[in-house]
Image: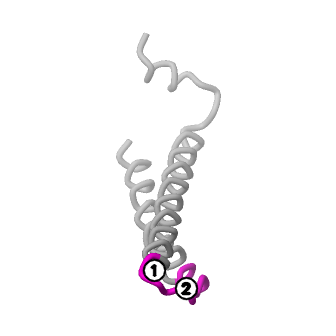
């Protein structure tokens, strides 16, 4: 028996599995953006600049890039749902 046959026989709708994958991808992207923000702060600290503006990091990196990535993920999810 293959995995696809077992997954198709599960008692939950298909959108649950797709939503779980979508949430997982969003969490991975958020973790990567957070790591980039921490790396930028460390680089600035190593160069001697200690006047950090955390709101600028939040709005510039996390919020802006997360919104664009979420839109991309939504289109991927819609395509996966329509194409099977």
- The residue closer to the viewer here, 21 or 79, is 21
Residue 71 image offset from top left, x and y in percent: 45, 68
74 on left or right of 59: left
- Disc number at residue 44? 1
Q: Which residues are magenta?
A: 46-59
Q: Closer to the camera, 24 or 34?
A: 34
Asked if the residue at tag 2 contacts the one at tag 1, i.e. Cβ–Cβ closer than 8 Å, the answer is yes
| Residue 41: image location, x then y, percent | 50, 75
* Quadrant in the picture for the N terminus: top left
Residues packed near mark 2 inside 10 Å, few (<14), some (14 to 19) or many (20 plus): few
Q: CA distance from mark 1 to mark 2?
A: 7 Å
* Residue 71 covered by magenta stretch: no
Work out whether 24 lies above or below 5.
below
Q: Which mark is residue 59?
A: none
Q: Using the image, determine if residue 21 lies above or below residue 61.
A: above
Of the image marks 1 and 2, the number of the one nearer the N terminus: 1
Q: Circle 2 is placed at which residue position?
A: 50
Locate the C terminus by quadrant. Answer: top left
Please give the name of the residue rendered at 40% of the width and 50% of the height, measured from the top-left corner. Answer: 82
Vertical placement of 50 versus 26: above or below?
A: below
Q: Residues within 10 Å of mark 1 (few under 14, many from 20)?
A: some
What's the residue at 57%, 79% (across, down)?
58
Q: Quadrant of residue 56?
A: bottom right
Q: How is the image coloured?
A: one colour
- Front-lying residue, 41 or 31: 41
User: Number of callouts in the render?
Assistant: 2
* Residue 61: percent from left, percent from top: 48, 77
């Amino acid at each position: 028996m293959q995995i696809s046959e077992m997954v198709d026989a599960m008692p939950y709708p298909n959108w649950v599995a797709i939503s779980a994958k979508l949430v997982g991808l969003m969490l991975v992207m958020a973790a990567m953006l957070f790591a980039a923000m921490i790396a930028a702060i460390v680089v600035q600290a190593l160069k001697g600049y200690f006047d950090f503006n955390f709101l600028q990091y939040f709005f510039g990196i996390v919020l802006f890039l997360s919104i664009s990535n979420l839109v991309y993920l939504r289109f991927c999810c819609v395509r996966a749902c329509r194409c099977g």
